[in-house]
Each structure stands twice: as C-alpha cells, then as structure tokens.
Image: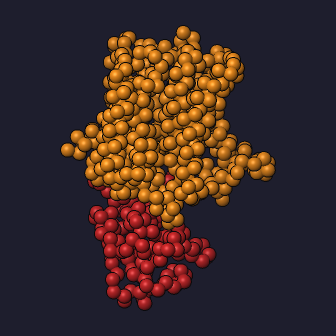
Amino acid sequence: MDFLLLTIALLLLLLAGVGISLWLLPKRPTSAAELFALSFLFGSATVSMASFLLGFVISGNRLRWSVALLCVAIGWNGIRQLRVKLPHGNLHSSKWLFVLAATQLTVVAWLSSVRVLGWDGLFNFEIKARLAFLNGGVLPLELLSDPSRTWTLQGYPLLLPLTESWFYGWLGRADQHFVKLLFPLFFAAALCLFSVGNRLSGTRSWRQLVPMLLIFTVPSLLIGDGSASSGYADFPLAVFYLASIIYLAEFWQSDDPTALRLAGAIAAAGCWLKQEGAILWFCVMALTALRFALTRTSWRDWKQLAKAAFPGLLIIAGWQIFARLVSLPDINQFSPLRFATLRSNLWRIPIIAEAVLRELTSWRHWGLLWLVVLAAIVWLFWQRSRSETLLPLAILLPLAFYSSIYVFSLWPSFLTHLESSFPRLLIQISLVAVWTAAVAFQPRRFGTN
Amino acid sequence: MAKLVAPNQLARSSGDNYATTDSYLSALELPHASKQVQLSVSNVPADEAMVFIAPDSTPETELVYRTISYLSWPRQVGVLHCAQNGAAPALLFKPREDKPVRWLLFYRHQVPAELSALPGIKEIGVHLKLVPARELKEWTFYCSQ
C-alpha cells in the first residue's frame, strides 16, 4: 500500500512537470529520458511552490487535493501537445547505456536505503517536511520565528522540504526511511540529462557511456555529505544546474530563444531549492549576457535575457519579501562584500587557494574528476571555438564565487568554514564538470554541427 | 558541524520511520529511542520550554541535543554546555521569553540533589533525565554538581 501511495504522489508530481516541460521545451523531438528529467525537476518545483502558496489559505486534505488537481490540470494541458519521440541511433550502445544506468541507479537506491539521512538532510530539510506534514502540509510559521531552532537554517527555500512533505501527505506519515527514495530520482534525472547532453554534443556509440562512467568514479557524489544518498540539497541543485547549462548550451548552439527560456526557468527553480541556487542562477544569466555581448547587442536580444531572468528574479525577490514579512532570522556567516573588508582580508587568499587546491585534488572525495576536468578545460579553450567556452566558464565562474566568498567569512577560523562547506559547494557544479569532461572527450562537440 | 559527525551519517539504517533519529540517539543506548523521547516529553505543555544540560559540546552531544529538539516539537529546547574551557556556561538556542523554561533535560550529567528528590522526574534510559523545574537558578548552579 505504501508503494502504491508513493507512486500516486510521484505520478501526480511528474504530471505537473510534464505539463510545464512540454510548454517550455523547444519545438523539436523530445526523448522520454529528457521528458522524465525535466518533469521530475519541474514537478518537484511545482508541487512545493503550490503547497507553499496555497498553504496560506488552506491546509490538510483540501491542500493536498487542490495541489493534486493543479498537477492534473497542468499535466492535461501539456499532454494535449505531447510530442515525445523515443531516442534513436545505435541500438547496441543504447542497450549498454540502459544497463549501465540501471546498475548505477540500483547502487544509489541501495546506498540511500541502507544509510541514514545526513546531518543537513535531517536537521535542515526533513525536519521542515515533517513539521509541514504534521501541520496539514503547511510549514508552521512558528518554526520560522523559533529562536531555539535557528540551527534548522530557517532562511533556506522550501523546494526540498515541501516535496518531501508532499510524499508524507500521501503516505499518511512522516517516514525517515521512505523519504530517502526521493534522492535516487534526482540521480536518475541526472543520468537522463547526460543523454540529453550526449544528443546536444552529437555523441554517438560507446562515448555516450563516458559521463555515466565518470560520475561513478566520484565518491562524493555517491556517499557522504551532500551526495545523492545523503538527503542534502546539494546533489539536487547540481542536477538543476546541469539541466540549466545543457539548455543554455543548446541556446549557444542554436540561438533558439525557447532553449534560453527553459534554461532560465530551471535556474529559477534552483533558487527555490537552496540559497546557492541564486549564485548559480546569476552564473547562468551572466553567461547568457556574455553570449549576447560576444555576438550581437540588439535591444530585442537583451529583452530575451530579461525574459529568461524574470522567473529567477521573481523567486529571489519573493522569498526575500517573505523572509522580511515573517522576520526570518538572518544568520550571517559572511561579512558584507565591501572593498575595505576585501583589502583587510587579502592575506587569506593564498591560504584559501591552497585549501581549494587540496580539496580539488582529494582523491578520496573526487577521484580524478577535477584533474580530468582541468585537462578538459585546457583542451576546450585550446580549441578556441566560441561556443565551447561556455562549459569551462560554467565551471570556473561558480568555482571562483565559491572559493572567494571565504575571504569574507565571519567564522573564527575561515579555514574550518571552508573545509566544512566547500566540498558540498563543489558537488553543486560537479555534474556540469562531468559533462564538460565528457564533451571534451568527443571528437565532435556541440557547436560544431 | 556536519563534517564532524559524518560517521553517524554512514551508519546503517534500520529501515524504520525513525531510522535516522534512532541512529543519531544511539548514545542514549536505548531501544526505539525516538519514540521513547517523544513519549517522555509528550506531557510537557507546548508553551513551556526545556533546556538540555550537557557536560560538554562534543559533536556527539550536539547530535543528541538537536535530535531531541527535533523530536520535541512544538516545545522549544535550549542547550547548556557545562564545560566551556573555564568560561561560564552559556545558554544557547535560548527559547523565546514567552515560553518559560520549566523543564531540564540532564544528559550524562548529575541531577542536583535538591532537584533529584522532586516528583515527576522521568528517566529516559540511563543517560537522560527529564526534570521539572518550577523555579530556575543561575545556569552555573546546574553545571556545578
């Protein structure tokens, strides 16, 4: 019975996601894998956002059924224009692709099942899901002003807790075991997105296996803080970022404004998942602006950027307004970004650089990923193809942000701050890094066809 | 902090509704610890707060405190770490002033003699005691025992 109820909850979530995906996808054939990945990402964003907004006026079964009806309505609207086309091509490699994906997914599901939730997974995310479930699907406002629970990081956005709460609502109980089944679905979405990336980069034959093989050599993505099995938001955010960069790459390649709109919408959903989502959203928008600056500067093109930026701005501004209205505690871990602070903390830079380098080369966390990525970045820049500079920049830009922010750390030891949080920040850009390495490995890359 | 308690995260799940919190409360050495904690605090009125008094602030203690706070919702739970390297113990995650502290949770710490005779003390395993405290003393008093 539990699995039946969880399946209903998942199907409704996917239905909402299908509707939104089909509305936003560029007018071209769409594979089932692509549709699943986008449906899961947009579905979780829709269910959590609808629960949050409707939760101001209704709760309990009325809220759950209202969200369910909304999912059906959005899904029905999308299905009317369904144009799914199954992937074609080398059947032999597709078979191996499927076997490899199924094996990896089984391993991640097993890891999720046999391990307990991580620290943040329980104390930042699942706790809010549990309390929302106990309060009829609505996060109790008392939690947000509870000074004894500031360690739950009340200022974090709510995509993950309210998606978990959606499943609890259908299950009829909060369950620290079943909730972990949500995270292999993000892993499945990542694998599906790699297949979209393969299509975009014109990858054929056994080379399609490269990103999947590479992802499985990275311990931090599979187990430990922030991994796909930990219940943290970092891996899901990595999936959102990968999706937004893939569609941004499609835009760089095709100039199709719908691809840009899709990239903007996915990056915006990332802002609803975790605060760092706003940084990644900014990177996506900055790369879009760079593309326009390099190619053309007509007013109409800048309007495209504004349209793509709008959903993210709406979510960031909306959450900030909500935070002020409910007086969310502002836990400052960083000082304001001022030139005077930068000047007085310049001495930290070599120490930070050394610590960052140490982390990137930690084979126990990352295997050889970042060394491979470094080679890929050098190779892609060497090619001097304008369209191929996107991927290195999509790694280097957030990496620069994430590394330099510790210059402004307010922790008594900024190095301890870095060592406790930087590995998780790296997870957020690691899937794009995996894809970049895979693209560099291809003889024919995106932008050249 | 998450990094410091990583080994707990790698603990095996029991597959139960409370798989994670039971694992995080393993220091209580109590079967079904989550349910027992919830049952014990269920008689504490929602508008009364509790303070978790611990001998130190090790990652293990922090994990137990936060898990108990997680399970005690909607009651607010502050924490008092007694050993502060010579500094006076300070109350962290202090409950709101309209939620008076009426209960103390002594974790691996001796209950002061004048409190141990009071009725209503609940033992949650051998390491944790829930003690009613109608009149609070200075926080140093609870650490000096």
Which one is in front, A65 or B115?
Answer: A65
x then y, percent, for residue B121: 34, 81
Give the colour of chain A: orange
Q: Residue at point 44% right, 43% down?
A: A49
x then y, percent, for residue A85: 36, 16
| Residue B49 appears in the figure | yes
Look at the picture and state if A132 lies above or below A93: below
Q: Residue furthest front?
A: A57
x then y, percent, for residue B92: 54, 69
Look at the picture and state if A8 lies above or below B73: above
Q: Residue at point 51% right, 80% down?
A: B143
**Chain letter for the part of the structure drawn in red:** B
x then y, percent, for residue A438: 51, 22
On the picture, is A92 further left or further right than A216?
left
Q: Residue at point 39% right, 80% down?
A: B131
Q: Residue at point 34% right, 33% down?
A: A73
